[in-house]
Image (cartoon, coloured by chain):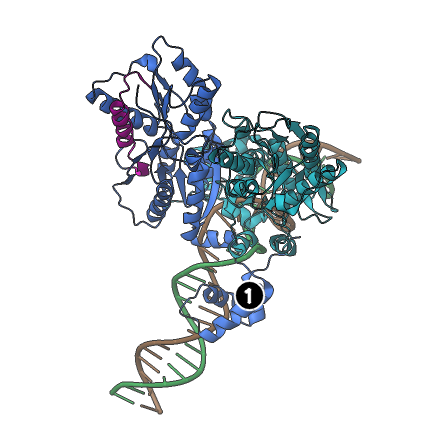
Chain colours: A blue, B cyan, C brown, D green
Amino acid sequence: MRVAITSHDVARLAGVSQATVSRALRDDHRVSAATREKVRQAAQALNYFPSEAGRTLSTRATRRVGVIVTDLTNPFYPHVVAPLHDELQALGYRMMLITERSDEAVAGEKLLDQSLDGVVLATATTESRLPAQLDRRDIPYVFLNRDTGQPGDYASVVDNEGGGRLVAGVLAELGHRRIAGIFGSPNTTTGRDRELGFRLALAEAGIGLPDSRVVRGAFEYATGYDALPRLLAADEPPTAVFCGNDVVAIGALNAAIAAGLRVPDDLTVIGFDDLPMADWEVFRLTTVRHDLRELARQAARLLVRRITGEADPAGERLVLPTEFVPRATHARLH
Amino acid sequence: MRVAITSHDVARLAGVSQATVSRALRDDHRVSAATREKVRQAAQALNYFPSEAGRTLSTRATRRVGVIVTDLTNPFYPHVVAPLHDELQALGYRMMLITERSDEAVAGEKLLDQSLDGVVLATATTESRLPAQLDRRDIPYVFLNRDTGQPGDYASVVDNEGGGRLVAGVLAELGHRRIAGIFGSPNTTTGRDRELGFRLALAEAGIGLPDSRVVRGAFEYATGYDALPRLLAADEPPTAVFCGNDVVAIGALNAAIAAGLRVPDDLTVIGFDDLPMADWEVFRLTTVRHDLRELARQAARLLVRRITGEADPAGERLVLPTEFVPRATHARLH
DNA sequence: ATTGCCGTGGAATACGTATGCATTGATCTG
DNA sequence: CAGATCAATGCATACGTATTCCACGGCAAT
């Protein structure tokens, strides 16, 4: 029913062979300017677009890249998916969005049928089986924002440990001593490294971080929202809380309002990422900035380099710096 | 370099023909249980997945659907893309995400090369050329949340006019008379219909809506954020403002804070959509609810019906009802 | 004038799957 | 027991593109 216009149709109209059509439209040097123009006209007239299935079969490349995220409604992901999409498009690739919850089976099947030239893993926990599966089939992939922590990885990440240290330093300087942490999942390097840097720098300042003031969970709104009341219920409630990322911090901020606390007078809250949302007047969230856009673009370029075989075979790990962004959710302890 | 395992490899190992492999793995009734099992084992052993390019070329179906949005970082879209993805997956289709800014050319090329079985347009303005192009090539598509307003459309939409009426009724009842509107773009039915319903119901209540208290713009944060100060600068500033959607309303709320206004004491603000964010403590936004998830799922199912030829050839327009959600950003005029 | 090269374009084929048709062996029917 | 029917499988081909190899004609060099 759907009338597919093929290169043969164009060839017939232009009075040349199908091979010449293919060459002309791809600017092959072995076709004269005159016939190239003739073919162009015919293709235009027929409203012809090369079938990408035919092309894929012939070239064994799809010019398509998969991007795996967990939950798009988590405000973090759109800010990484959008620049990824744009950079991939600029590099001549299309984006297949796959949201993977726990069903690695489905994701696996979609990934392994040769329909993707490469994959961006924006969601891999340290125990995911996906990387091994991709390795086995020689499908290029890169980690975005998280990695396995193994050497040989291809990853675009942030200096999480450094960012954690920054926050600890600020809190110590502000006089806080009863400090809490709502960290990311311990099975993500993002969660672990931020906690690690934070702990190390606190320890250097002589400040302890007892388990009773530590919560860990997914990088979600609910994690911050649910954790804060539990932390505040302690005998000696914290005067400051460092959150695994901005989304968690925003959850905590809303919980603080629900609990009738004033931020920052009663409680200092600090996030990580500096999402655009963090700068909204309702939040004015003090946080740690890194260049999310560059994080994504870097991942896209790295993946394409891996696809074209230009990447370092020993792995590449691109690390972006962090910067403390003081806004209105932190205060000196009085 | 990448060793592709094909059905021929499986056939050789299983000691059958390639045709039998194809049939066995697709549960064709004409293959015996014994050989089916034999083929299964061989496929498993070789870690074989059918090439989707080969399959596409042969069946002329990609089981892939394109979803076009403008800007994923706009908080509205993730809440529609996520359920779309899940419903499409449940229906056996994959999702190709395409963000279209103004470059219809790029989008067009990607859409028209037969690499998609169908398209969800979540972004179409009334003057977009895309629908015509898709029609010309017989590529099935549905509108999501917006449509052209023409008969024959396939669309999953909300009762925008009814929703606008709801808000007007409430504001009138609360005693507001100097009312403003920050509506969506006039070249979207979403923007037009909400404004229309709002205007009609206001008029029925004997309340005018002068141009000086009307702003129109994209459904973005910045639209609300920039428009509010302009509206407030009038000689007789409004006591209530109805925003085209929640994202715009949230922009307006933040602008109100920046201007030192108290909401709802000094100003009533009402949104549309009831995004999860609207319920956050920092906002507690009074708004109009509709079932976003169902909106998306309905669109997915309608598209698949169009693809399989089961949809009504005269077009189908699925309309979801709206409901007023009172929270904390509206108040009676004192 | 012959040779050889170069520029241009066509014929043929590969890519991997699905499927119509032919084939085979076996069972059934009268 | 011969012929018909049927289940199971193989053979061959189509899908649309890119590309290798080959053919042909013109032109320059000798």
A289 lies left or right of B271: left
Whether residue A264 is in magenta: the answer is no
Whether residue A160 is in magenta: the answer is yes
Label 1 belongs to which residue?
A43
Depth order, front residue of B140/B217 = B217
Q: Chain of mark 1?
A: A
Depth order, front residue of A178/B47 = A178
Query: Horizontal and vertical percent for residue A166?
Result: 27, 30
Query: Horizontal and vertical percent for residue B285?
Result: 56, 29
Residue B240 visible in image = yes
Query: Horizontal and vertical percent for residue A320?
Result: 29, 39
Residue B49 visible in image = no
B269 lies left or right of A188: right
Q: What is the span of residues highlighted in magenta in the rendered image?
A: A153-180
Say which quadrant the C terminus of chain A sits in.
top left
B127 versus B69 height, above or below: below
- Label 1 sits on a secondary structure element that is helix
A69 lies left or right of A202: right
Residue depicted at 41% across the width and 24% down the height: A218
A230 lies left or right of B163: left
